[in-house]
Amino acid sequence: MQFDKYLNYRHIAVQFINASVAITLRTISQHTAQANAAHSALNCPNSPLGTVRFTTMLTDDQKLFFATNGYVLVKGLLSPSEASMYRKECHSLATRLADIRGIEDPTWGSAGTRGVTQLRHCHDVQFQSAKLAQLLLDDRLTSCAADCIGSPNVQLHHSKMFIKPAEKGSPFPMHQDAPYFPHDNHSMIAAIVHFDAAPIEKGCIRVVPGSHKLGMLPHIGDGGWHLDPEEYSVEHAAPCPADTGDVLFFSYLTIHGSGINTSDEARTTLLIQMRDPTDLPTIRTHESRGQGMMLRGIDPLCAARPAWEAEPQPSHAMGGQTMGGTMGGM
């Protein structure tokens, strides 16, 4: 009797061990398959996970294109799910701002569409949303920025959310960002992160390829600093349609603008202006509390300022005039 009971217990124990081993092996197999799939996705640009990577660096061809044309569009830097999350964060922020501050429309007077078209915006989003603050430090974003700037160190100048509402999203006349905040070495670049698709009908960014080589051009100061629309029209500039998750990098000397959003969906983007921390502002203007934050690398100057910058200067850049409108629109 006792021997039979022992055999029964032994049989039950063996079954339990076998079942446990089977479950463990099945779990390991599943994890291995997931890991292999993720590894394959990292090396397959057509995979939905193809943009999930720890570092995104520009290729030599992309660097040459940026140097030649003053801009480069990096496809799929964010995954669709990431972009969707950030889009919701932006629209939630816009709703909060409207409820607390009321709706502020930064449409440029020079666009000639005030009262007809609209914009929603927010400067320095890192002080409004932790998720958006984390995006500023995303290694994929900052590594591409470093390649464009030509420095391992990337410093924030400012960030700005823009939402072009459906069917009436305001345009931006063609302009350079440089007149708003000129710097000695012109290392400043912009990155426009697309949280939803931006085809031509949604008022995508348009650029004048190679215009960064012209230097800083004289701008018209009435209604937001812009170039003569007869010489530089939005319609004749090269469109840069973008898909969800794409990021457009361009020099602050590159002439750019955008058209009206006539589609049935809002266009949602985040503009991030960045520079080499050793590239000092030619004048102190458009300063903000978030300015100077290191997004990548270090600040070799330790935030030191030359003696001539000891006292704040008037906010102006060109011809001694004060600049109006929303700086660096898109």
Image (cartoon, helix red, strand yellow):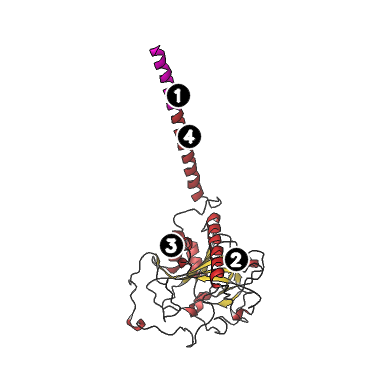
Asked if disc 4 and disc 2 are in contact, CB closer than 8 Å, the reply is no
Estimate the spatial distance between the alpha carbons at disc 4 and disc 3, rounded to whole Å: 38 Å
- Lower position in the chain sequence, tag 4 or tag 2: 4
| Boundaries of the magenta span | 1-18
Q: Main secondary structure of the magenta part?
A: helix
Asked if disc 4 and disc 1 are in contact, CB closer than 8 Å, the reply is no
Q: Residues within 10 Å of mark 2 (few under 14, many from 20)?
A: many
Q: Is-magenta flag for residue 69?
A: no
Q: In which image quadrant can residue 164 be found?
A: bottom right
Q: Residues within 10 Å of mark 1 (few under 14, many from 20)?
A: few
Q: Amino acid at mark 3?
A: Leu
The kind of secondary structure element at disc 1 is helix
Q: Residues within 10 Å of mark 3 (few under 14, many from 20)?
A: some
Q: Residue at x 56, y 70 (%)?
A: 98
Q: Which mark is residue 137?
A: 3
- Lower position in the chain sequence, tag 1 or tag 3: 1
Q: Is-magenta flag for residue 6?
A: yes
Q: Nearer the viewer, mark 1 or mark 3?
A: 1
Estimate the spatial distance between the alpha carbons at disc 4 and disc 2, rounded to whole Å: 45 Å
Q: Nearer the viewer, residue 184 or 136?
A: 136
Which residue position holds label 4? 26
Estimate the spatial distance between the alpha carbons at disc 3 and disc 2, rounded to whole Å: 23 Å
Question: Relative to 156, is 16 above or below?
Answer: above
Q: Where is residue 11 shown, x and y percent of the image? A: 43, 20
Q: Which mark is residue 267?
A: 2
Q: Residues within 10 Å of mark 4 (few under 14, many from 20)?
A: few
Which residue position holds label 1? 15
Q: Residue at x 65, y 77 (%)?
A: 115
Residue, far top: 1
Q: Where is residue 67 shown, x and y percent of the image? A: 48, 69
